[in-house]
Image (tube, grey):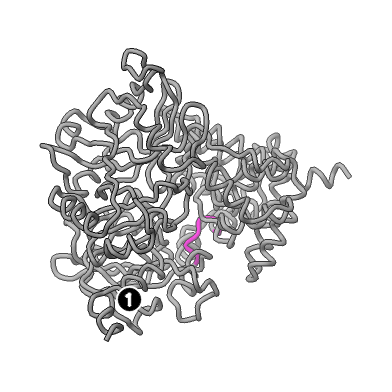
Amino acid sequence: MIENIEQTFSFSKFTEICELVRNTSSKNKKVDIISAYLSSLDEESLYKAVLFLSGRIFSRGSPHLLNVGFRTIMQSLFEISDLNKDDVSKIHLEHGDLGRIAEYAISKKRTVTLFRFAGEQLDSLTLNDIYLQFKKIANLSGPNSNNEKKNILKGLLIRCTPIESKYLIKIITNEMRIGSYEGLVEIAIAKAFDKSVESVREALLISGDISNVALLSKSDKLQSVTLKPFVPMNFMLADVMFTGDEIVEYFNKSLYCEFKYDGIRLQLHRFGDDCKLFSRNLSDISFAFPEIVESAIKICKKGSKNESKNAIPVDFVLDGELIGYKDNKPLPFQELQKRLRKKVMSREILREIPVQYIVYDVMFYDRKSVIRDSLATRKKLLSRLLLKNENIIIATSTVVAAGEEIDLNFKKSKSEGYEGLVIKDPESNYHPGKRGRYWIKLKEELDTIDAVVVMAEYGHGKRAGTLSDYTLAINDFKHKTPADKNNILESKIKEDKSNMLRTIGKAYSGLSNDEINFMTNKLKTLVVKDEGSRLIVKPEIVLEVSFDTIQKSDRHDSGYALRFPRIKNIRFDKGINDIDNLEKVENIYRNQFHIRNKVNQ
């Protein structure tokens, strides 16, 4: 019985489950396999298994980063096995998967190496062994750290069977590709511990930590989930409407009206003497905006007499927009993006691209979560904050009740260099990760589309040798069944997320030469299949695309095409989970002036 328990917690058992999931096409059967496995684990192993199955190494908000690259992995494999470089190239071209190379390499481990590491391989690996070694690697720094990382990795690989080595490398490179994406793991957690899928998803949206949600589900404490310091929660999202009258007719009450800023959505966590900034894709980008971190730490709340001299330190999590702001006007978004590309913020960069953080909501205030409070209540809490520097301000909210008032504010927003308006229901709670008609975006008649690059082609003439033509895709939540065999994304990318992606068009204008060079270098690291003049790539890079109109099209499997698309921005702050969906495209199509007129005639 003891042997069975130990086997359950072993890395070998984990890889067995991964293989079963990979070889199963049915979503329901995948859920059954994962849920049965999760229910058999103790808390320590459950935490690690859920992370690895979700394509993570450490939980969201963790300070640990593995930073093990292609070169370190390949050096480790060559040093412990009789690898043939031609075989490596063939495997990599066929599968685009370092895990397959590792599996092949470990099948050819050298006997002398096995003897040398014999003391380390007496026991089979457990999930906890793997996790602890990952933490050791993440904690390494200094001039000799790469060599130390390689030695730890070699020690792990020596103890692996070929199939274990495959999944060890898949975890390290975040390339599981077995169909166990986070959404599927959520369903499996719910089934394993007899919880509703909705309650598990709600808990994850609040806490941001899927492993912690699994532990709370197992111990029947899901209702106690709360926001954790420095673990970013999902942002509340806005829906789209196209006129002030449409908004007023829908709500039929007074609303908050705020400018829509063209910047980076930013979640600010301040607890004690520490502060961190998280972007839309929940990445820690504190390094890029040190002046905001410094200002946030100085923020206090007003005392009982509402006087500055009675200021009291306070912990909080804020939601807002970070914009470039210079000479009393907003800077173009492209200028702000330059800050994200820098590893070190020099004084020159800080002077060249000054920023301002405009706060419009609060999710945690003074030791408690406030997401279940009304927006009106949350605004009152924001008004109690004492801001020390002008680079953090509270957004101005105007109360409106008529379409004419909204239209006037829209014109004012545009005249001051902003994008438009966001209209908000004062009675609304904060809904993490959900797009609903509590917040409404009002921009120009046609919005922009955030789409992910799924294919790239080499350019011609001055752009020869660079990947400058990009095929873009959006999410399709309505049709989640696998696409037909001719679908580029289904047949060539072979990732579960990809069968919810639908192509919407190609874009090749709008980027500078430097941006095209960046895209070329980045896309070459994401290759799934090389077809000579074009590359099928992992859907990771998000582009914000403007366009003239949207028209119906048989050329793209979304059924629509962007007419005269132009790349507005590379969205470094967004990931595949943030791209727009087919429903938004359909809405924009229906609300185009010529389409509305045709319907109304």
Q: Across the whole image, how many numbered discs are drawn on residues?
A: 1
Q: Where does the N terminus fall, quadrant-wise? A: top right
Q: Nearer the viewer, residue 326 or 75?
A: 326
Measured from the top left, where is residue 303 in percent x and y? 39, 18
In the picture, measured across the screen, residue 265 lies left or right of residue 146, that is left
Judged by its main secondary structure, the magenta piece is: helix
In the picture, measured across the screen, residue 94 lies left or right of residue 120, that is left
Residue beneath disc 1: 590
Q: Residue at x 33, y 72 (%)?
A: 532
User: Over which residues does the magenta segment extend?
Assistant: 95-100
Residue at the far right in the pictured view: 1
Q: Where does the C terminus fall, quadrant-wise? A: bottom left
Occupied quadrant, residue 314: top left
The vertical placement of 135 against 162, above or below, is above
Q: Residue at x 59, y 48 (%)?
A: 52
- On the question of residue 516 being in view, the answer is no
Occupied quadrant, residue 130: top right
In reply to whether residue 99 is colored magenta, the answer given is yes
Measured from the top left, where is residue 562 in percent x and y? 27, 73
